[in-house]
Structure formats: C-alpha cells, structure tokens
Image: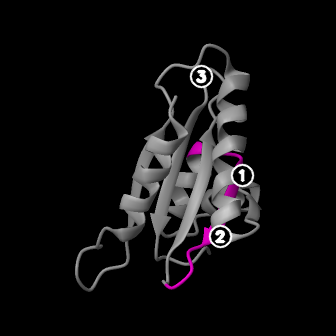
Amino acid sequence: MDIAKDLALIDTLCARDFPAGHSGYHAAWLGPGDWPDASDCYAYEAAVAERLTDRWGEPSRWGTVTLQERIARGEVISEPWAMLAALAIDLRTWDIPGSDRRAVLAVADRNGEDQPRLRVFVTDTDPP
C-alpha cells in the first residue's frame, strides 16, 4: 500500500483529457487488490481522503440509496454515477480547483460477499 503512488495516480487522472466533445470519467482501483482484513480498506480510504481534503478542502458526502431507488424506478442516471451507485453505499466527492472536474472516492462494498475495494473516479459529469 503506497498512498503517495495512489495520489500520483489521482493527479494523472485529473490531468488526463477526456475524449473531445464528450463528458466523461476516468477510474482506477487504489490500494492492493486483496486486503488482509476488510477494515484495512476503510482505513486506507480514510487516509487517502485525509490527504485529498488537505489539498482540496472538505468533501461532499453522498449516499447512493436515492440513486439506487431512481434507477429501480427506471430513471436513466448518467455515468459514472450509475456505476458508483451499483458499487458503493457512500461516496466522498471533491471539486478540483481550477477545473470543471470532481474526484470521487468510493469503497466498492455494495456486494457483501466480496471483499471491499477502494476506487477513485475523476469526472466532469455533474452528480444527478
């Protein structure tokens, strides 16, 4: 687990262009693929979030229950938000200064059978 390496990856995602004329997002897994214990994933998320908060200020916190309900009613939710609702219960989002982008940190833990994994998204698509 190397937070500095993962922060550099987030910086790369923030700087990378989206396809011309399209809203989009970039996504990556953070931390190891297999945590010794599920609680380690949440601790790593907190550590990454602390560093992003030092950079960009307090994040907005989102629960995905409402998004799940809207999807279940047949509403089309734009990506990456529909994918995030399928993966995670809680999201942390930061507006990235000097851009129209936001970074989203999420623990993919909605499927209780799988071990949680930490994922980051960088998007220029507004939350629904």
Query: What residue is drawn where x is 52% and y is 28%?
Result: 1
Marks 2/3 in contact by CB < 8 Å: the verdict is no
Range shown magenta: 87-98
Which numbered disc, 2 or 3, marks the residue that appears first in the sequence?
2
Q: Is residue 126 above or below residue 69?
A: below
Whether 91 is among the magenta residues is yes
Give the CA separation, mark 1 to mark 2: 10 Å
Q: Quadrant for the C terminus, please.
A: bottom right
Residue 37 locus on image (x, y percent): 67, 16
What amino acid type is highlighted by mark number 2? Trp
Badge 2 is on which residue? 56
Q: Secondary structure at mark 3?
A: loop
Q: Residues within 10 Å of mark 1 (few under 14, many from 20)?
A: some
Q: Does residue 79 show up?
A: no
The colour scheme used to paint the residues is one colour
Badge 1 is on which residue? 50
In the picture, measured across the screen, residue 75 lies left or right of residue 125, that is: right
In the picture, measured across the screen, residue 85 lies left or right of residue 18, that is: right
Label annotation for residue 115: 3
Residue 81 locus on image (x, y percent): 55, 62
Between circles 2 and 3, the one closer to the viewer is 2
Q: Is residue 35 above or below residue 3?
A: above
Query: What residue is drawn where x is 26% and y is 86%?
Result: 21
